[in-house]
Image: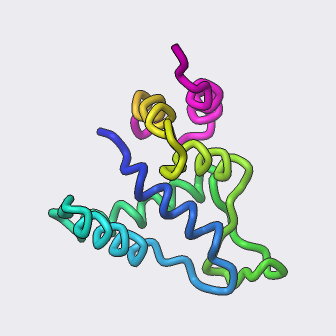
């Protein structure tokens, strides 16, 4: 089963911008669901999307993509900063960049394991190679 890379991208962006405010993965899932709805792609199970956001938050923290935000950077014990690995994942997922489909395809090949440090660190160089031809 493929991970919801749009949701993971949203969580990483929110972690990056969470100085001084609590990290709220369920709310970010609701925001994404509303955007999908507006784009004509209805979300059939909002509760599932909220649960996925919470699960992804735990995986991202556990596997070193995000870490607690230091107090001197606006940390309040309820928010995060991106690690180098998290910043790399965000740059791979950046939907505003043309060609962002290729890294997602490479990550999808690994499935859930793509969010483990060993697999991600092996896949990242491959995913960042642009397809030319």
Residue at x-position 37% and y-position 74%? 31
The magenta stretch spans residue 131:
yes
Residue at x-position 60% and y-position 68%? 15
How many numbered marks does the figure carry?
0
The magenta stretch spans residue 24:
no
Q: Quadrant of residue 39?
A: bottom left
Q: Give the left or right position of residue 30, taking residue 61 as reference.
A: left
Residue at x-position 78% and y-position 74%? 70
Considering only vertical position in the picture, is 65 above or below 124? below
Residue placed furthest toward the left: 44
Q: 80 and 133: which one is in front?
A: 133
Q: Which residues are magenta?
A: 111-133
Q: Report x, y in % for residue 46.
A: 23, 69
**Scheme of colours in the image:** rainbow
Considering only vertical position in the picture, is 132 above or below 72? above
Q: Report x, y in % for residue 91.
A: 62, 47
Q: Report x, y in % for residue 9.
A: 50, 56
Residue at x-position 69% and y-position 80%? 19
Give the main secondary structure, helix, strand or loop, of the magenta stretch.
helix
Q: Report x, y in % for residue 129.
A: 61, 25
């Amino acid at each position: 089963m493929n991970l919801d890379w749009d949701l993971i991208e949203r969580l990483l962006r929110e972690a990056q911008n969470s100085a001084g405010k609590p990290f709220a993965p369920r709310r970010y899932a609701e925001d994404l669901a509303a955007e999908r709805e507006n784009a004509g792609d209805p979300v059939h199970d909002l509760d599932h999307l909220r649960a996925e956001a919470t699960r992804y938050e735990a995986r991202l923290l556990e596997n070193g993509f995000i870490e607690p935000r230091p107090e001197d950077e606006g940390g309040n014990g309820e928010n995060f900063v991106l690690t180098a690995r998290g910043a790399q994942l965000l740059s791979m997922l950046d939907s505003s960049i043309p060609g962002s489909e290729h890294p997602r395809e490479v990550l999808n090949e690994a499935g859930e394991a793509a969010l483990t440090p060993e697999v991600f660190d092996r896949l990242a160089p491959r995913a960042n190679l642009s397809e030319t031809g």
